[in-house]
């Protein structure tokens, strides 16, 4: 029994030892299992990192390969886009957004460049209308031989009546016989009425000598035929009779002088030696220049547009007031005060904003339009000068906009799209600040040079109708006659009466 007990105890002890060994082994295995799990997690995380890294490297490699392959195409596309913008900015230039003349617009549809005024369409309040009526001084006109009063009555004397009127013109060929003592041989000449009408219809109505000859032939019921040479002689005589000295004196005595020039086509012009040269199968380009103010116009002709030709005119060289001009460099060499045209500037700024996509230009344009609007309001209100504090704010705003333009220019890449246009405009505003602000500093200085533009418009119309001048003498005659007519119109004089007075004095007979 003891042996059995001892055997049991020994067996228990052995089982206990084995159990402890198994417990230790289990603990070791659990520890190894935890380590293996941790290692597994590390390996899994590493694998995920490797997969992500490989994917990133693959993506980056693909992106780099695509970027490298596409770079030449993108550069080419960018270059094409730049060229498209450049060409588009050139093609879209017209008289509304640049200094190009309206004659260069072609058949493009040009948008209305005028700013909205808020006024209704049609005649404004105070506008002098035109209607059919009977002049109050009819009897005086009849007595002066300027009108006839014909009465056709359907009523008897003393009977009440109302008057219906018909206004008409009557053309009758008048043969006036002057009887004198025998002496000089008899002569036949055209009268001043016909001469004045011929000059008017030719220069103002732009009728050719051929059509004018036909007109007089028909209107006289085919009684008279005025030759083309005779009609040319009327113009020649009228030009010789006109003395522009008084007109020039009027211009020199004024405070503001508008000046501009326009090219014309002519078959004949003087060369540098002063000799006339005639073109063959083509035409020459010459220039008509205007000097004008509100009451006077003087046109001159030059074979070129150099500064020497301006000196030869001898007008700007003697003028000491405000010169209104279109930013023509040679004109800055004359006088001391210049009111550079704001209309040309705002058109150029509009072109920069629309064609070169420069928002800064639109801001500058709005600033100038705002100043001009304020000036117009002051003038309508009877003010003769800008308020000092407001003028100071305008001056500061001008400098601020100029600095913004310089800053934007500094951030642009040289030779990039719009760079040169912006550079020129910034330099222009910097160099000519006093010229562009003169209109707001001195209310007598105009904002635009439209006066000169209007005085030259007839020259362009004539060229469209006639094509070109046939002789240089014809150009000179046209300039003198047109100066006379434009000045007479500005001064409220009747053009036919002015030409009639001229014809009655000195126009040649014209056989």
Image (spheres, helix red, strand yellow):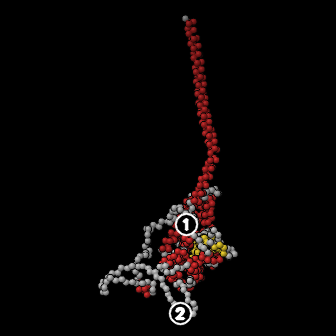
Mark 1 residue element: helix
- Looking at the image, which residue sits at the far top? 1
Whole-percent x, y for residue 146 in the image: 45, 84
Specify the label residue 180 is tagged with. Answer: 2
Find residue 181 and report its image quarter: bottom right
Mark 2 residue element: loop
Alpha carbon separation for disc pair 2 and 1? 58 Å
In the image, residue 460 above or below residue 234 = above
Q: Nearer the viewer, residue 406 or 80?
A: 80
Please give the name of the residue rendered at 59% of the width and 82% of the height, measured from the top-left corner. Answer: 240
Whole-percent x, y for residue 23 in the image: 57, 20
Asked if the residue under mark 1 is in contact with the one under mark 2, i.e. CB atoms within 8 Å, the reply is: no
Residue 448 seen anywhere in this rendered image of the structure? no
Please give the name of the residue rendered at 58% of the width and 91% of the height, measured from the top-left corner. Answer: 184
Q: Residue 464 vs residue 164: left or right?
A: right
Q: Nearer the viewer, residue 385 or 138?
A: 138
For label 2, count other residues whose C-alpha is less than 10 Å away and answer few (under 14), some (14-19) or many (20+).
few
Residue beneath label 1, please?
Answer: 102
Label whose residue precedes the other's in the sequence (2 or 1): 1
Please give the name of the residue rendered at 56% of the width and 7% of the height, measured from the top-left corner. Answer: 4
Specify the label residue 433 is tagged with. Answer: none
In the image, residue 503 above or below residue 402 = below
Q: Nearer the viewer, mark 2 or mark 1?
A: 2
């Amino acid at each position: 029994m003891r042996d059995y007990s001892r055997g049991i105890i020994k067996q228990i002890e052995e089982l206990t030892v084995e159990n402890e060994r198994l417990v230790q082994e289990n603990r070791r295995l659990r520890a190894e299992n935890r380590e293996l799990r941790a290692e597994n997690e590390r390996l899994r995380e590493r694998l995920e990192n490797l997969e992500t890294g490989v994917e990133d490297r693959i993506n980056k490699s693909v992106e780099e390969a695509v970027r490298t392959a596409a770079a030449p195409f993108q550069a080419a596309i960018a270059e094409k886009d730049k060229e498209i913008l450049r060409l588009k900015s050139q093609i879209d230039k017209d008289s509304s957004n640049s200094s190009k003349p309206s004659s260069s617009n072609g058949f493009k549809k040009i948008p209305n460049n005028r700013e909205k005024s808020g006024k209704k369409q049609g005649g404004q309040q105070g506008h002098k209308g035109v209607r059919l009526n009977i002049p109050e001084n009819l009897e005086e006109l009849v007595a002066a031989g300027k009108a006839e009063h014909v009465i056709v009555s359907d009523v008897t004397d003393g009977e009440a009546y109302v008057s219906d009127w018909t206004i008409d013109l009557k053309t009758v060929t008048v043969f006036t016989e002057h009887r004198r003592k025998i002496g000089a041989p008899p002569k036949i000449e055209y009268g001043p009425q016909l001469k004045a009408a011929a000059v008017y219809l030719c220069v103002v109505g732009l009728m050719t000598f051929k059509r004018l000859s036909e007109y007089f032939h028909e209107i006289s019921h085919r009684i008279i035929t005025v030759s083309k040479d005779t009609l040319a002689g009327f113009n020649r005589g009228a030009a010789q009779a006109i003395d522009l000295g008084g007109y020039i004196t009027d211009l020199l005595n004024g405070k503001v002088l508008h000046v501009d020039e326009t090219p014309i086509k002519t078959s004949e012009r003087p060369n540098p030696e002063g000799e006339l040269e005639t073109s063959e199968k083509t035409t020459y380009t010459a220039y008509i220049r205007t000097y004008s103010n509100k009451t006077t116009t003087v046109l001159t002709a030059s074979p070129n547009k150099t500064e020497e030709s301006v000196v030869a005119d001898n007008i700007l060289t003697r003028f000491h007031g405000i010169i209104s001009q279109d930013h023509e460099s040679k004109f800055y060499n004359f006088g001391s005060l210049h009111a550079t045209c704001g209309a040309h500037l705002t058109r150029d700024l509009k072109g920069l904003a629309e064609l070169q996509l420069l928002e800064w230009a639109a801001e500058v344009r709005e600033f100038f339009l705002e100043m001009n609007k304020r000036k117009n309001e002051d003038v309508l209100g009877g003010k003769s000068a800008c308020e000092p504090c407001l003028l100071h704010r305008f001056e500061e705003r001008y400098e601020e906009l100029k600095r913004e333009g310089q800053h934007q220019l500094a951030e642009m890449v040289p030779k990039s799209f719009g760079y040169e246009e912006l550079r020129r405009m910034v330099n222009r505003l910097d160099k000519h600040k006093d010229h562009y602000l003169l209109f707001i500093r001195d209310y007598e200085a105009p904002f635009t040079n439209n006066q000169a533009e209007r005085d030259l418009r007839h020259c362009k119309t004539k060229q469209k109708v006639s094509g070109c001048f046939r002789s240089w003498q014809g150009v000179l005659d046209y300039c003198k006659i047109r100066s006379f007519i434009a000045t007479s119109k500005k001064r409220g004089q009747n053009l036919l009466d002015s030409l009639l007075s001229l014809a009655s004095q000195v126009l040649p007979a014209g056989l």
